[in-house]
């Protein structure tokens, strides 16, 4: 093996304090980027949870609907026109909206009601751990998630509370249905959802569509658009994209996350560039000697780039470790930091790019060396 | 008669800027033949280091030509000059310039490593040369664990391991006691016994005279005298 790697590692470890500072700088910067990007991935997933958990293949919605939580309404009569379109097997209303939940002890808290047909195509709670979905047909029955027990003043099934001044009874409890808005979801039947949210009986938030087995998604989508007129018809994938772009970019949340990540990269680049530069400056005499005894510039750059790469590897290992801890710690929260394999690979590539890019100032410094200085020192 | 391995003609060179600008070389011609050990002597500030830097292709003269192995170097760019140095010239510096974080063997091996030579072969060659300079037992020592004389011997091993045609040494014995100085000069004189290789040593140390085949005297940027050791002094015309 060439001595370039040995020179690089010795240069790094020779000044331990500086090496530690470099690594801490990289860790700080990459953890910042990891958290921001992990939040981005987490947020991206969270904003489409409801769409992901509905078996609907097509979503019919009022024109201009920006995301799942959009409160605009359409006319339920559209449902019968939709059912008349060839290829549509099922079209059912979904009603969503905010409501006030009154705890047994009398205080109130806002909840987000999701009501759909209990039998057939709907949006039902998943991961039910207590009670049964079928029991939601009982008058006043709702399903909530155990995450929000305390907030809703509930500790298990069959307990009661009030929604819009009507008595409700928790008949099913799910696990892990969290909302990134932190407003608890309350699942119920579509008719009662209208009551709780104050929605006119002839209105619905969405019509969910399931296709006949051999129907073509795109053809049915087009046919629905032609026949229904003043609505939008999106595939589940299209609706996911629309929800994401609204929450991530319409609100500026995504831009803020990216800005945070960019800040991390800038901080990291400055720190690494600074320490590599000062290390190179300290070893300038050696680099000049290398040049005097005839090394190519490439040989010298390789030494500096090895220093950058070694710092990157050690720094990334530290940052990835911390990232894992953060991901584990936030896994059960409303907005988890999610580390996917792809994100991990991308972060490593970013760390390497950042460190090697930072080597440029050191390389420029070395390029200016006058090898003749070895005789006068 | 041996071939000329290094030849400089009418070198003129200035150093410094503005009011501090001095003409360090004022028309110097010098050639080294294979099998020679030449001493370059002169008072401090006479231009010895400047001349050595130019002969070693570390500096480009303001005027005059340098040929290494018959090849003019004026047209070469920095990378080509570096290649020429690693292939043809070995350097020994007064302050050794060893790498403090590398052991003796790796310091020597560096001269071969910059040529891209195979690590295994380079290690063997480095050990062999370290043994030649009497440091076979210290190849794993770091420079700070070696005495001044030992460090200079490592530096010499680095300069000779590449078997370059030319060895340039700037006051190699300056920091050494007599016995270490003698040992080092013996090593250099042995190299110059090879008819294809030449050694140029800058020194003020008269104790080195017995090792030389020729002595060149420089004063105020000009060569003033040249004497073949053992022959009568011959005066060089200085135009
Ligand atoms: N960097 C420099 N700037 C200006 N003058 C210099 C510089 N280096 C050397 N000199 C001058 O150039 C002349 C030759 O220097 P040098 O070749 O180092 O002499 P020597 O090695 O014989 O002592 C001296 O007068 C010295 O003062
Ligand atoms: Mg000098």
Image (cartoon, coloured by chain):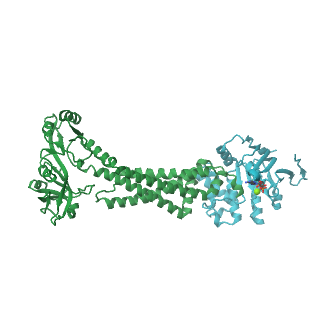
Quadrant of ligand 1: it is: bottom right
Residue in view at x 52 percent, y 61 percent = A19
Residue occupying the point 81% across, 51% down: B221
Residue B82 located left or right of residue A117? right
Question: Where in the figure is residue A3, as x and y percent of width and height?
Answer: 58, 54
Residue A17 in the image: x percent, y percent? 53, 64
Residue sitting at x 55%, y 55%: A5
Q: Nearer the viewer, residue A157 or A313?
A: A157
Q: Is residue B38 left or right of residue A354?
A: right
Query: Camera-side residue: A164 or A25?
Result: A164
Which chain does the green colour mark? Answer: A
**Spot occupied by residue A143 in the image (x, y as percentages of width and height):** 16, 56
Observer-nearest of B2 and B48: B48
Residue A298 against residue A157 in the figure, above or below: above
Shade of chain B as shown in the rendered figure: cyan
The residue most toward the left is: A139
Q: Is residue A77 left or right of residue A14?
A: left
């Amino acid at each position: 093996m060439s001595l370039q790697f040995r020179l690089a590692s010795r240069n790094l470890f020779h000044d331990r304090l500086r090496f530690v500072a470099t690594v801490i700088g990289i860790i700080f910067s990459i953890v910042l980027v990891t958290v921001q990007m992990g939040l981005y991935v987490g947020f991206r997933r969270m904003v489409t949870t409801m769409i992901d958990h509905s078996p609907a293949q097509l979503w019919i919605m009022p024109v201009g609907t920006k995301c799942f939580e959009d409160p605009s309404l359409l006319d339920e009569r559209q449902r019968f026109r939709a059912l008349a379109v060839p290829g549509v097997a099922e079209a059912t209303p979904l009603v969503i909206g905010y409501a006030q939940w009154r705890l047994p002890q009398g205080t109130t808290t806002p909840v987000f009601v999701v009501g759909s047909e209990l039998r057939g195509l709907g949006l039902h709670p998943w991961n039910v751990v207590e009670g049964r979905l079928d029991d939601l047909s009982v008058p006043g029955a709702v399903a909530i998630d155990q995450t929000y027990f305390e907030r809703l003043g509930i500790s298990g099934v069959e307990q009661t509370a009030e929604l819009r001044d009507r008595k409700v009874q928790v008949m099913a409890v799910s696990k892990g249905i969290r909302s990134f808005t932190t407003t608890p979801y309350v699942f119920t039947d579509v008719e009662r959802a209208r009551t709780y949210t104050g929605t006119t009986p002839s209105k619905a938030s969405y019509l969910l569509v399931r296709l006949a087995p051999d129907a073509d998604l795109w053809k049915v989508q087009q046919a629905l658009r032609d026949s229904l007129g003043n609505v939008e018809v999106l595939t589940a994938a299209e609706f996911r994209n629309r929800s994401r772009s609204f929450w991530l970019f319409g609100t500026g949340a995504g831009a803020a996350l990216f800005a945070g990540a960019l800040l991390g990269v800038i901080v990291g680049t400055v720190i690494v560039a600074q320490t590599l530069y000062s290390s190179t400056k300290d070893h300038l005499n050696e680099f000049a000697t290398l040049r005097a005894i005839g090394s190519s510039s490439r040989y010298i750059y390789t030494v500096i780039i090895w220093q950058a790469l070694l710092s990157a590897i050690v720094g990334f290992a530290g940052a990835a470790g911390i990232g894992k801890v953060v991901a584990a710690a936030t896994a059960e929260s409303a907005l988890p930091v999610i580390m996917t394999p792809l994100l991990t690979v991308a972060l490593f590539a970013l760390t390497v790019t950042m460190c090697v890019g930072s080597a440029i100032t050191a390389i420029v410094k070395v390029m200016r060396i006058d090898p003749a200085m070895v005789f006068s020192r | 008669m041996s071939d000329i391995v290094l030849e400089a003609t009418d070198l003129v060179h200035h150093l410094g800027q503005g009011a501090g600008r001095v003409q360090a070389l004022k028309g110097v011609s010098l050639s080294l033949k294979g099998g020679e050990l030449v001493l370059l002597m002169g008072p401090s500030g006479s231009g010895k280091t400047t001349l050595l830097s130019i002969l070693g292709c570390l500096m480009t003269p303001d005027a005059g030509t340098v040929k290494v192995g018959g090849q003019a170097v004026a047209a070469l760019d920095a990378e080509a000059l570096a290649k020429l140095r690693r292939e043809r010239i070995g350097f020994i510096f007064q302050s050794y310039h060893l790498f403090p974080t590398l052991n003796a063997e790796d310091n020597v091996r560096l001269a071969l490593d910059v040529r891209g030579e195979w690590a295994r072969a380079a290690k063997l060659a480095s050990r062999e040369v370290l043994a030649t300079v009497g440091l076979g037992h210290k190849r794993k020592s770091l420079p700070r664990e070696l005495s001044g004389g030992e460090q200079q011997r490592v530096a010499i091993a680095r300069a000779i391991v590449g078997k370059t045609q030319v060895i340039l040494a700037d006051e190699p014995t300056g920091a050494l006691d007599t016995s270490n100085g003698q040992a080092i000069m013996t090593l250099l004189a042995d190299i110059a016994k090879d008819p294809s290789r030449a050694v140029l040593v800058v020194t003020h140390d008269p104790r080195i005279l017995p090792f030389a085949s020729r002595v060149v005297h420089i004063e105020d940027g000009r060569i003033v005298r040249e004497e073949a050791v053992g022959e009568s002094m011959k005066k060089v015309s200085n135009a």
